[in-house]
Image: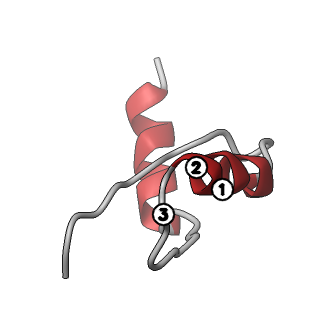
Amino acid sequence: EGPRQWLAFPAAASAAPLVARIAADYPLVDLSVREPDIEAVIARMYEAAP
């Protein structure tokens, strides 16, 4: 499958400028933009709770 990179950014940020910047600097063969699983989001919320 080749090398992969995983990036995370704040939900309020748009993916478009990030993808444009990466595409300007590196050749993209395939790209997938996914939201995190709801289970992972809820787990992080509970882990961060005081």
Q: Is residue 6 left or right of residue 10?
A: left
Q: Amino acid at mark 3?
A: Pro
Q: Position of residue 37 (x, y in %)?
A: 48, 68
Q: Which mark is residue 27?
A: 3
Q: Earlier in the sequence, mark 3 or mark 1?
A: 1
Q: Amino acid at mark 1?
A: Val
Q: CA distance from mark 1 to mark 2?
A: 5 Å
Q: Is residue 20 above or below residue 21?
A: below
- Which residue is labeled 1 in the image? 19
The crowd level at tag 1 (other Cα within 10 Å; few <14, some 14-19, many 20+) is few
Q: Is residue 15 left or right of residue 37?
A: right
Q: Is residue 47 above or below residue 40?
A: above
- Which residue is labeled 2 in the image? 22
Q: Residue furthest top?
A: 50
Q: In the depicted view, which residue is nearer to us: 5 or 42?
A: 5
Q: CA distance from mark 3 to mark 1?
A: 11 Å
Q: Amino acid at mark 2?
A: Ile
In the structure shown, which secondary structural element does the residue marked by tag 1 occupy? Answer: helix
The crowd level at tag 3 (other Cα within 10 Å; few <14, some 14-19, many 20+) is few
